[in-house]
């Protein structure tokens, strides 16, 4: 064993004395006390965050979890795995507070993934993957501080499900599309009916206003006509003249068609003479 050695940049080494933790040696030139100090070897880490068995890497690491079967809230079975990004910030805790750090990270990440998937439906798992990643990262933060690491992010890599589930999702998607199409068609028809009703209402209102204006003009004209008659005659005679005029105007309308038979009242001659005098 070399008593003088170099620790590369962004690495460190745990030194034990008589089998107990002694110190952490950081990057640069370092020394060992003969027969007393030994480097802590981490062969169980299987090369992750570790080089040569004793160099602990302090840079960001990536752990790919194996796929695990998960059950969604709506009882759909899926296979899920994730990539966990982490780095060691306290080598002492990372070595002594947890047994085999890399595999423990994989297990805790998978457990959190499985627990969170169980609280949401399959549709949410597929559409809210980023939110799910963030929730898992937050939940791992407490454990990370105990282990002397920090989780920088968690990313769900793959979600797989059975063919039956895929077929059911396709049917549901087609049904939803048809539903949206029917709703859109119904909304279009309702809009057209509404617009037609509004148009008819506006036309009716315009006709009513026109008729009202016409009646108003006729009434004003008759009042003016009657006023002029009163100036030339007395009120009784003016009224008779106006009635006679109305009668004559009415006769003109009902006798326009030569084929119609018209029965004249017994006092027709008197009324006609009043109307004739008025025209003079």
Image (spheres, helix red, strand yellow):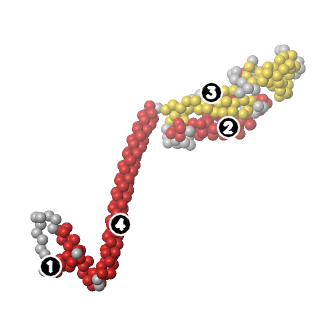
Q: Earlier in the sequence, mark 3 or mark 4?
A: 3
For label 3, the crowd category at 10 Å Cα-Cα, with few meaning under 14, some 14 to 19 and many 20 or more, is some
The reply to whether discs 3 and 1 touch (Cβ–Cβ < 8 Å) is no
Q: Nearer the viewer, residue 77 or 209?
A: 209
| Along the viewing direction, whichever of 254 and 162 lies nearer the viewer | 254
> Can residue 100 be seen in the rendering of this structure?
no
* Label placed on residue 269: 1
Q: Residue at x 12, y 64 (%)?
A: 258
Q: Secondary structure at mark 2?
A: helix
Badge nearest the viewer, 4 or 2: 4
Mark 2 Cα shell of 10 Å, populated few (<14), some (14-19), many (≥20): some
Q: Quadrant of the N terminus?
A: top right
Instruction: State which quadrant residue 250 falls in.
Output: bottom left
Q: Identify the residue at horizontal 84%, vertical 14% (top origin).
A: 2
Residue 3 location in percent, x, y?
86, 16
Is there a contact, CB below 8 Å, between mark 4 and mark 2? no
Residue found at x 29% / y 83%? 233
Which marked residue is nearer to the observer: mark 1 or mark 4?
1
Q: Residue furthest front?
A: 280
What is the secondary structure assignment of the residue under circle 1? helix
The residue labelled by disc 3 is: 64
Give the number of the disc on residue 187: none
Q: Which residue is mark 2?
A: 140
The residue where tag 4 is placed is: 213
Query: Is residue 11 or residue 146 the one in the foreground?
Result: 11
Dot 3 or dot 1, earlier in sequence:
3
Among the two numbered marks 1 and 4 on one chain, the one whose residue lies closer to the N terminus: 4
Q: CA distance from mark 3 to mark 2?
A: 16 Å
């Amino acid at each position: 064993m070399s008593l003088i050695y170099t620790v590369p940049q962004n690495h460190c080494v745990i030194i034990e004395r008589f089998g107990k933790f002694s110190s952490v040696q950081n990057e640069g030139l370092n020394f060992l006390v003969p027969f007393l100090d030994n480097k802590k070897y981490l062969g169980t880490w299987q090369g992750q965050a570790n080089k040569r068995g004793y160099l602990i890497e302090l840079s960001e690491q990536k752990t790919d979890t194996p796929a695990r079967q998960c059950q969604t809230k709506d009882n759909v079975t899926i296979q899920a795995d994730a990539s966990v990004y982490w780095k060691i910030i306290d080598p002492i805790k990372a070595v002594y507070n947890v047994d085999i750090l890399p595999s423990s990270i994989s297990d805790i990440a998978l457990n959190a993934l499985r627990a969170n998937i169980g609280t949401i439906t399959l549709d949410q798992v597929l559409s809210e993957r980023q939110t799910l990643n963030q929730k898992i990262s937050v939940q791992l933060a407490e454990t990370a501080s105990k282990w002397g690491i920090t989780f920088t992010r968690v990313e769900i890599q793959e979600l797989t499900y059975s063919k039956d589930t895929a077929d059911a999702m396709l049917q549901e998607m087609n049904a939803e599309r048809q539903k949206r199409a029917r709703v859109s068609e119904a909304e279009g028809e309702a809009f057209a009916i509404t617009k037609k009703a509004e148009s008819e209402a506006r036309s009716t209102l315009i006709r009513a206003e026109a008729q009202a204006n016409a009646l108003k003009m006729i009434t004003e004209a008759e009042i003016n006509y009657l006023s002029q008659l009163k100036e030339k005659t007395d009120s009784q005679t003016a009224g008779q003249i106006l009635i006679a005029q109305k009668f004559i105007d009415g006769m003109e309308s009902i006798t326009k068609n030569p084929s119609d038979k018209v029965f004249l009242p017994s006092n027709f001659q008197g009324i006609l003479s009043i109307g004739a005098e008025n025209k003079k």
